[in-house]
Amino acid sequence: MKTNTLTVFCRACNSRIRFDKRPELYDSVTCPECDETFEIISLSPIRLDWPSDFGDDEWSDDDYDTDSFDD
């Protein structure tokens, strides 16, 4: 009996990351070789990307100079 193991390649080290069950969209997955953490951004095909952190520390309205825009 053949088992259906899903596989994707790590974007950091190109190692195989295997899934025993179908992942959910936006799940986090860690590469067993390089310990880099990714987010699942597509299920068909399964695609990984680095997680987006849009925390309050990273960006604020003060980062944009709105006075430089012409109306």
Image: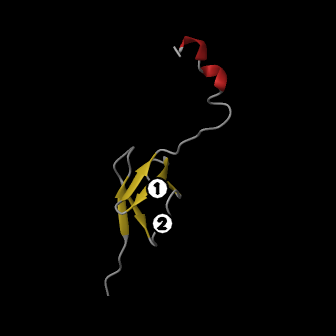
At 35% from the left edge and 53% from the top edge, which residue is drawn? 15
In front here: 4 or 32? 4
Residue 8 lies in what quarter of the image?
bottom left
Of pointers 1 and 2, the one earlier in the residue sequence: 2
Mark 1 is surrounded, within 10 Å at the Cα level, by few (under 14), some (14 to 19) or many (20 or more) other residues, namely some
In the orientation shown, which residue stands out farthest toward the bottom?
1
Residue drawn at the location 59% of the way across and 17% of the way down = 66
The location of residue 29, given as percent across then percent down, is 50, 56
Residue 51 in the image: state x and y as whole percent.
Answer: 52, 45
Label 2 amino acid? Pro
Q: Would residue 17 be seen by someone viewing this image from the given angle?
A: yes
Across and down, in percent, residue 71 comes to 53, 16
**Disc 1 target residue:** 40
Question: Vertically, is 65 above or below 45?
Answer: above
Q: Are marks 1 and 2 in contact (CB under 8 Å)?
A: yes
CA distance separating discs 1 and 2: 8 Å
Nearest the viewer among 51 and 13 is: 51
Tell me which residue sits at (35%, 76%) in the image.
4
User: In the rendered image, which quarter contains the N terminus?
Assistant: bottom left
| Amino acid residing under circle 1 | Ile
Which numbered disc covers residue 14?
none
- Secondary element type, mark 2: loop
Q: Which residue is mark 2?
A: 23
Density class for disc 2 (Cα within 10 Å; few <14, some 14-19, many ≥20) is some
Does residue 45 sit above or below 39 in this rendering? below
Residue 14 position within the rendered picture, expressed as x and y whole percent measured from the top left:
33, 49
Query: Farthest residue toward the right?
Result: 56
User: In the rendered view, does 59 fall on the left or right side of 39?
Assistant: right
Quadrant in which residue 59 is drawn? top right
Asked whether the viewer can see residue 31, the reply is no
